[in-house]
Amino acid sequence: MDLAGKVVVITGAAGGIGSALARRFAAEGARLCVSDLPGTELPPGLPVHADVTVEDEVRELVAAAERELGPIDLFCANAGIATGQGLSADAAVWDAAWSVNVLSHVYAARAVLPGMLARGGGYLLHTCSAAGLLTAPGDAPYAVTKHAAVAFAEWLAVMYGDAGIKVSALCPQGVRTPMLTRGLDAGDPAALAVAAAGPILEPEQVADAVMAGLAAERFLILPHAEVAEYVRRKAADPDRWLAGVRRRLRR
């Protein structure tokens, strides 16, 4: 996908991967609408503060972008949260993870797809996680909801691929964002497991991987190349893979 002149919406744009995507897309000549929670400072672009867990606000975000910039070519559903909790996570924690990590993607698709389908094309980029392909030791709500996010992206690709809709699932492992660094500072087992599993990339490196993935129109965008090998090992021998994860946690 050539981004020059394209209208792009990015949620979760106030920091981390979202702001790196905004900077990179702007450099490629995209026309940006950037969004995050009210009160956050946003990178350059059309700013629309919105809570992506509220469907009406997502619809207004899409409407504002189309009103000011024109039809949306690429929607990046990038907002996400971690919890750092396991069985102790209460219903409110699970609800929050489900709302941000899954339902926000559903709301975005429902808001933007009708216009894309009417025009015969469009692109959806869902920021998921390697946890959605593997797991997230120490964070059950994150692991489960990121699996659901990947599954939803797959479903969209199957259902709408023949109608001109492209879908990519961005599945990085460790990225130097506030979400990860806070966990590392707190000694969170999930964050420590991520740091031990491979290199911690800068958000700009993830943006580079996204550009390559969009250009190739790949469904899975894996900034950490080793994740593909982990997925292959998991599929080839799940029991051995699970045992390997447990051994890594004991180190």
Image (cartoon, helix red, strand yellow):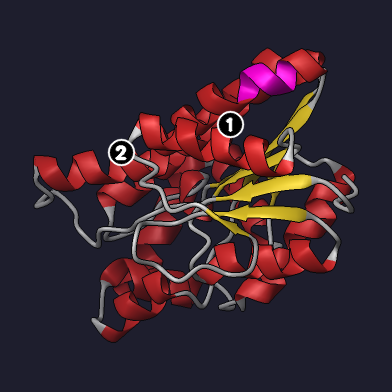
Residue at 73 percent across and 16 percent down: it is 117
Q: Is residue 158 visible?
A: no
* Distance in Å between CA atoms under marks 1 and 2: 15 Å
Disc 1, SS: helix
Magenta span has 156?
no
Given residues 209 and 124, the one toward you in this image is: 124
Asked if 77 appears above or below 66 in the picture, the reply is: below
Q: Look at the image and give the residue range highlighted in magenta.
A: 113-117
Label 1, residues with CA under 10 Å away: few <14, some 14-19, many ≥20:
many
Q: Quadrant of residue 94?
A: top left
Given residues 97 and 42, the one toward you in this image is: 42
Quadrant into which the N terminus falls: top right
Residue at 56 percent across and 33 percent down: it is 63
Label 2, residues with CA under 10 Å away: few <14, some 14-19, many ≥20:
many
Asked if 191 appears above or below 238 in the picture, the reply is: below
Q: Tag on residue 98?
A: 2
Question: Is the stretch drawn in magenta largely helix, strand or loop?
Answer: helix
Q: Whole-percent x and y of residue 164?
A: 81, 21
Q: Quadrant of residue 239?
A: top left
Q: CB atoms at circles 1 and 2 under 8 Å apart?
A: no
Q: Earlier in the sequence, mark 1 or mark 2?
A: 2
Q: Whole-percent x and y of residue 203?
A: 61, 73
View extreme (front): residue: 68
